């Protein structure tokens, strides 16, 4: 079981760390809207240029507002360091590309986030990188897929479409034996509920557009890892590719992080409440939420995570496309939108991906992804009930 957080530790990180001597005793950290930083002497200037990742020189590299945000996220993830970038996909692609070269091999879970899948299926092909895809439920699948040139194992646990988990501690041990870098997308659980670095995973990436931002008003990403790994990524991918986080975006994340530990338990309670409510209905075929006792990997979920976030999916028994459309048009308090992780509840049917004359896989026709926001649970339950009842 990962280490439990104590309230003082979290408050210390989110409310105090790095904020003891702000200019003019300001309570909110200032936004350093400056592209360049100057030096007092030739010597100081030259010293900084020798090691850009440790100094404020130019805001494509480091910026004080951005660095304060990075320091807090690294502390939350129990890693030495973090690098904020302009989006979740920038975090994912920088972390992957920093450890891949022509002729290498990677192992990736089959049900990763769409654009992660694109990188492994399509983008890396251009560089002659071979990829083996695995379901990833057992460590043996990874063991069998390893080749002498395997450099990266990519994980997403829970995966945000199937909600399946990978046994992180075992995979980390296996990878270390073979000198393979492990990368995990931890967007779903957040460091409030899961710390993959404590289980031995090397790099933890996030879409900060989800719970770190928490208000559906920011697009950002972050990579967490050892000082050595983050410095390597900084030099080989971040500086040349330029996915720069701007200071205002970092400031918005700093502001919203202050309530992360208060928001996550509410998302958890609402998601679990809705999942249980849906599971008990006779028009629902299944509910995919790792913290639901009926979930096939429930025990592993309890072992690796301290709780769950707001995103889950459920499948209706019907395969009638019109009913799925009608239900979607009947929800009132769930917004119809992509993404997730904000204060608001969302409703996102898989059927959207298929036009009327297009065939959809049987398990996708009536699969619906829900984000449980911060609203009253009873309000959300009542809303789903009236929408589902409307097609009875
Ligand atoms: C949204 C998301 C991403 C991509 O993040 P962006 O900030 O949209 O670039 C990556 N992984 C997961 C699991 C996501 O949900």
Image (cartoon, rainbow, N blue to C red):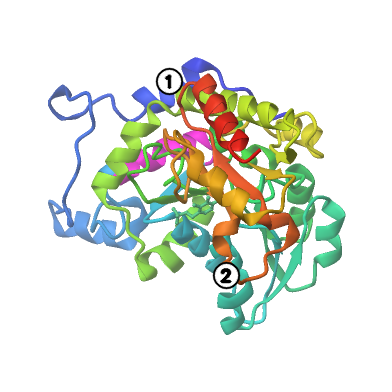
Please provide the residue range marked out in magenta.
66-79
Q: Main secondary structure of the magenta part?
A: helix
Q: Is residue 14 left or right of residue 322?
A: left
**Residues tagged 1 and 2 counted as in contact (Cβ below 8 A):** no
Residue 160 percent coordinates (x, y): 61, 48
Q: Is residue 244 above or below residue 292?
A: below
User: Is the CB–ligand 1 distance for label 2 below 8 Å?
Assistant: no
* Tally of marks: 2
| Residue name at image x 55 percent, y 17 percent | 6
Q: Quadrant of residue 242?
A: bottom left
Question: Which residue lies at the image location 16% right of the left edge and 60% below the top edge?
Answer: 42
Q: Is residue 338 left or right of residue 183?
A: left
Residue at horizontal 64%, vertical 27%? Answer: 272
Identify the mark nearer the N-term, 1 or 2.
1
Q: Is residue 321 above or below residue 119?
A: above
Image quadrant for the N terminus?
A: top right
Mark 1–mark 2 Cα distance, whole angstroms, equals 38 Å
User: Looking at the image, which is closer to me, 341 or 382?
Assistant: 382
Q: Is residue 213 visible?
A: yes
Quadrant containing the C terminus is top right
Relative image position of residue 330 (x, y in whole percent): 50, 40
Which residue lies under the disc numbered 2?
A: 118
Residue 68 magenta: yes
Verify whether residue 318 appears in magenta: no
User: Which residue is labeled 1 in the image?
Assistant: 11
Q: Residue at x 27, y 57 (%)?
A: 47
């Amino acid at each position: 079981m990962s280490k439990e957080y104590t309230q003082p530790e979290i408050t210390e990180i989110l409310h105090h760390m790095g904020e003891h001597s702000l200019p003019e005793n300001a309570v909110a950290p200032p936004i350093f809207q400056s592209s360049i930083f100057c030096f007092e002497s030739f010597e100081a200037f030259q010293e900084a240029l020798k090691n850009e990742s440790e100094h404020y020189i130019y805001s494509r590299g480091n910026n004080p507002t951005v660095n304060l945000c990075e320091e807090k996220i690294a502390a939350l993830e129990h890693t030495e360091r973090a690098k904020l970038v302009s989006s979740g996909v920038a975090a994912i692609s920088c972390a992957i590309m920093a450890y891949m070269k022509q002729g290498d091999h990677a192992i990736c879970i089959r049900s990763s986030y769409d654009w992660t899948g694109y990188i492994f299926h399509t983008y890396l092909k251009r560089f002659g990188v071979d990829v083996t895809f695995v379901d990833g439920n057992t460590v043996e699948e990874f063991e069998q897929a390893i080749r002498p040139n395997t450099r990266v194992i990519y994980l997403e646990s829970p995966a945000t479409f199937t909600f399946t988990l990978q046994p992180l501690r075992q995979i980390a041990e296996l990878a270390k034996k073979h000198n393979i870098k492990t990368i995990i997308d931890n967007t779903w659980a957040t460091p409030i509920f899961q710390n993959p670095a404590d289980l031995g995973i090397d790099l933890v990436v996030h879409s900060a557009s989800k719970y770190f931002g928490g208000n559906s008003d920011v697009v950002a990403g972050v990579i967490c890892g050892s000082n050595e790994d983050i410095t390597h990524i900084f030099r080989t991918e971040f500086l040349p590719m330029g996915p720069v986080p701007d200071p205002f975006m970092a400031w918005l994340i700093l502001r919203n992080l202050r309530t992360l530990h208060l928001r996550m338990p509410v998302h958890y309670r609402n998601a679990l409440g809705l999942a249980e409510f849906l599971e008990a209905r006779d028009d629902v075929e299944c509910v995919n939420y790792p913290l639901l006792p009926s979930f096939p990997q429930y025990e592993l979920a309890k072992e690796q995570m301290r709780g769950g976030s707001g995103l889950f999916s459920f499948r209706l028994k019907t395969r009638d496309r019109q009913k799925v459309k009608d239900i979607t048009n009947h929800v009132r308090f769930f917004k119809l939108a992509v993404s997730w992780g904000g204060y608001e509840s969302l409703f996102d049917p898989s059927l959207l991906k298929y036009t009327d004359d297009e065939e959809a896989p049987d398990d996708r026709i009536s699969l619906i992804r829900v984000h449980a926001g911060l609203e009253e649970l009873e309000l959300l339950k009542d809303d789903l009930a009236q929408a589902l009842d409307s097609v009875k």
